Image: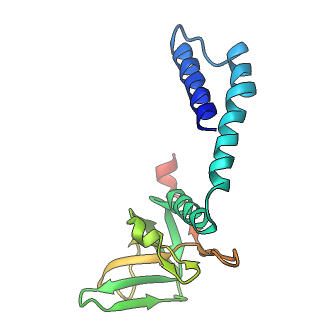
Amino acid sequence: MKEKLYDALKKLVNLVEFAAQDDGGLRGDNWDEYEKEIKPLSDAALKEYENGLSTMELVEKQALEDYAAVVGKIFWVRDINGYSGTGKIHNLAALEHPILVVVEPTESKDILDWVGDWLKPTWNVRVLTSMSYEELVRCWIEGHQYNAETEEVQKTALVEALPPRELTQ
């Protein structure tokens, strides 16, 4: 399979190089070759790769994809955790009013945090609205949680915030 994938990638590189010359583009015969020969090989290689992964590896792959989809975005949340300046952990669950946070870069060890059969990722956030625990020096929210044994999923309640009107005009 690796040889087929290599051949598919080699053909794709040749097509891209052709597209860059004289604005040839991927159309007509080139597009047909891509659709008929290259895409099925790359799809098959991806499927074979995913079939070779354990349930835990697939869950970790999904958790990393979940994080990639939210990093840098702004959300309204009702549950947040954080460290105070004294090192005490605060778990602010079911806040009366949601707060605005932006998901920030997070180390993979925090995203790939296993507790028994559960993958319980946490994502670093920066609080954008005032709240009663302003002394928190590091804040995080829980990401979507996955059970590798039962394949149960617990989605985090996130409501994406729309940008202020003046930024979209």
Relative depth, front residue between 33 and 3: 3
Q: Taking 36 as reference, is 138 above or below it?
A: below
Q: Nearer the viewer, residue 140 or 37?
A: 37
Q: How many marks?
A: 0
Picture quarter with the N terminus: top right
Q: Position of residue 155 (x, y in %)?
A: 63, 74
Residue at the spot 59% in from the left edge and 25% down from the top edge: 12
**Is 36 placed left or right of 142 in the picture?**
right
Where, by quadrant of the figure, is residue 134 drawn? bottom left
Residue 28 in view here: no
Residue ID at (44%, 65%): 103
Residue 43 left/right relative to 86: right
* Coordinates of residue 82 in the picture (x, y in percent): 37, 83
Residue at the extreme top of the image, as rendered: 22
Q: How is the image coloured?
A: rainbow
**Residue 98 visible, this orientation:** yes
Q: Where is residue 147 drawn, in percent x and y? A: 63, 77
Relative image position of residue 44 (x, y in whole percent): 70, 41
Q: Is residue 45 above or below residue 120?
A: above
Reply above or below: 30 against 149. Answer: above
The one nearer the camera, 148 or 138, is 148
- Residue sitting at x 42%, y 72%: 110
Q: State left or right for residue 150 relative to residue 128.
A: right
Extreme left residue here? 86
What residue is rendered at 50% in x and 73% in y?
A: 121
